Amino acid sequence: MKIPLVDLQTQSNQLCADILPALENIIRKANFVLGEEVEFFEEEFASFCEARHCVGVSSGTEALHLALRALQIGPGDEVITAANTFVASALAIAYVGATPVVVDIDPADYNINAELIEAAITPQTKAIMPVHLYGQPAEMGKICELADKHGLKVIEDASQAHGARHRGQRVGTFGDAGCFSFYPGKNLGGFGDGGAVVTKDAALAQQLRELRNYGQATKNVHSCLGFNARLDTMQAAVLLVKLRHLETWNAQRAAIANRYHELMSDTGIELPHKKAHVSHIYHLFVVQHANRDALMEHLQQHDVFCGIHYPSPIHKALPFLNVRISPDGVPLAEAVANRILSLPVYPELPDEGIIQVAEAVKAFQPAEVVG
Ligand SMILES: *Cc1c(COP(=O)(O)O)cnc(C)c1O
């Protein structure tokens, strides 16, 4: 069978009957913008994240952008983030006029290497933006300790890690703000774009509510340069239904990862490392191989479709941006960019599919290996 990197169709079809009445209800009430479903979802998602407040916004990118803005980060400031992340992390930093500073990764989990952060701190540094990449939490203990020591804000990019835990604590709740994306392909995804910020700070939550809604404190009273960046009512209704399944889906992803480990331990590809003190929710299952491109091509010929997350570190992916590289450089992020491959992982992937992927990986001839 054909195994896509991500399969959205199976899940959408399974949930269609549950979601349609919720959408019909909104159509009949015609409360399309900031309808009550947005508030219901915010309450439920805050509770799921074990966070105090949640503000729904229009995308993960806007969650990061508005969080940075609400925390007063702007021109002349520097924000430290990981060199290997989705471009949106760095774009959001640039939107507020700040400079992204990239730090190398920890080879054990591909996340920002917390041991290398201090060397990148300058008098301009205002915040650290760890990204819980592929669904595995970054080293939040060390990161929060450094932030406290240097008076920095922490904005977590949790767009790939809805529900993951670090030493038992949900991601998104360590820093000043935790940012999530509900892009359809994420572990929790809508039927279009959406995002959210969670925070323990009531004043920050209020500011985010104003920022997402033209800067309106109350009708026609404008407190700041605001945006139109609200979570859509229809998306909130979809997310309310899907949130009830998220723990199950995350557990299914972890079970698939375990199967991959069982079936591919002797194939010569480097499998993901799971740190003992975190729960990994496997947004992506990323392996490494010296001959990545040939492996990807070979898998495609066996109907297994993979991805690369990401083909270049952000300073190379965004050549038009002024991205500063940490004084230590980012050699590991640059090296793994040519070796990483994301194998299919989605909750509905059946065991025959998992076996097919593993068999296809095993059939890759060592003779094809270079380097
Ligand atoms: C998806 C993603 C984003 C952006 O989210 P959108 O909803 O697509 O704007 C930001 N950061 C990371 C790490 C992501 O994976």
Image (tube, helix red, strand yellow):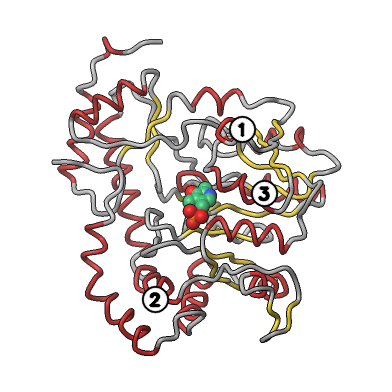
Circle 1 packing at 10 Å, graded few (<14), some (14-19), many (20+), is few
Q: Residue at x 44, y 35 (%)?
A: 273
User: Whole-Å distance between the Cαs marked 3 and 2?
Assistant: 30 Å
Q: Which residue is mark 2?
A: 237
Circle 2 packing at 10 Å, graded few (<14), some (14-19), many (20+), is many
**Where does the image place residue 259, in percent across and percent down from the top left?**
27, 41
The N terminus is located in which quarter? top left
**Where does the image place residue 225, in percent across and percent down from the top left?**
73, 68
- Name the amino acid type tagged 3: Ile
**Is 172 in front, or is 87?**
87
Helix, strand or loop under label 3: helix
- Name the amino acid type tagged 2: Ala
- Dots 1 and 3: beta carbons under 8 Å? no
User: Whole-Å distance between the Cαs marked 1 and 2?
Assistant: 39 Å
For marks 1 and 3 on the same chain, the one whose residue lies earlier in the sequence: 3
Q: Residue at x 39, y 68 (%)?
A: 243
Q: Residue at x 57, y 47 (%)?
A: 131
Circle 3 packing at 10 Å, graded few (<14), some (14-19), many (20+), is many
- Dots 1 and 2: beta carbons under 8 Å? no
- Name the amino acid type tagged 1: Pro
Q: Which residue is mark 1?
A: 319
